[in-house]
Amino acid sequence: MGNNPSTLRVLAPLSFAYDFAAQQYGMFSSPNMLDVHNANPAAFSPQPFFIAGFFFPQQLFQLAWLWKLCRGEGTPQDRKDMETAVWPYVIGNVCIGTWMFFWNKNDLATSNIFVIINTLTQLLFITTTLPALRPNSTPSLLTHVVAKTFAGIGVLDLLHNTSAAYYKGVPPSALVQVATGVGFAAAASVSDWIFGGCLVYDLIALGIGQGGNWGRLLGAYAGVTAGILGFRNWGKRL
């Protein structure tokens, strides 16, 4: 029953609605999520308005994907691709929505549990289970955009929430600085433009959010990551 197409077409929009409602609560409650962000500066605190700038278009892609999923549009392969992505999508929305309630209570250690579950779920899905992209198929393209943007912002969420929960106000050590550059460069070396573009965006959001020498270094890492992506994907389609 859990993988019945009709069940999946109900669960996916319900999970979207739950996450959307939680985000509205997070923005308009007191304290709101920006207040908590400002009260817990850390080495991986991003510029908060970059997060809003990411989520707005990402939600539009989600709505387009949900529309096609719920209407059963496309070829049998298109529908299979979309249905394959539903369970990670539902888990992601439930985790992100639930995260908000603990974040706004300033219980960052508990909120981090939901961040970890979401990020690992999305990364595991896009690296092991996500069907191959078929660029000429709109449902396939939307499936990849939704799945990989979930994973891409999940990386930023994991860095941010973990540092804010356990290392509030602690500057990054030399090891952390080097590991950040190596980690993002390594991820870029095996990424396409969708997920890789999210990694570059993550670094830019972090760099602007941090400022100073650490912010400039993160900006340099963004440039290196973009360069690796360009070299790896030169001449390729998405």
Image (spheres, helix red, strand yellow):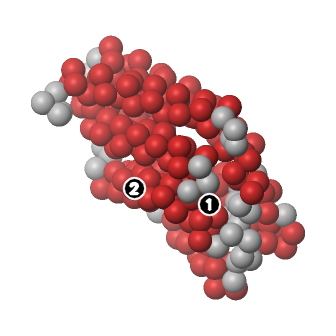
- Number of marks in picture: 2
Q: Which residue is tagged 1?
A: 160
- Quadrant of the frame with the N terminus: top left
Give the camera-side residue of 100 and 222.
100
- Left-right relation of 72 to 50: left
- Residue type beneath disc 1: His
Q: Earlier in the sequence, mark 2 or mark 1?
A: 2
Q: Which residue is tagged 2?
A: 117
Whole-percent x, y for residue 44 in the image: 67, 64
Q: CA distance from mark 2 to mark 1?
A: 15 Å
Q: Quadrant of residue 183 in the image?
A: bottom right
Position above or below: 169 against 62:
below
Looking at the image, can residue 74 be seen?
Answer: no
- Left-right relation of 64 to 6: right
Q: Residue furthest bottom?
A: 174
- Left-right relation of 69 to 194: left
**Residue at image location 59% in from the left, 71% down from the top:** 166
Secondary structure state at the residue bearing disc 1: helix
**Residue at image location 66% in from the left, 44% down from the top:** 33
Secondary structure state at the residue bearing disc 2: helix
- Residue type beneath disc 2: Ile
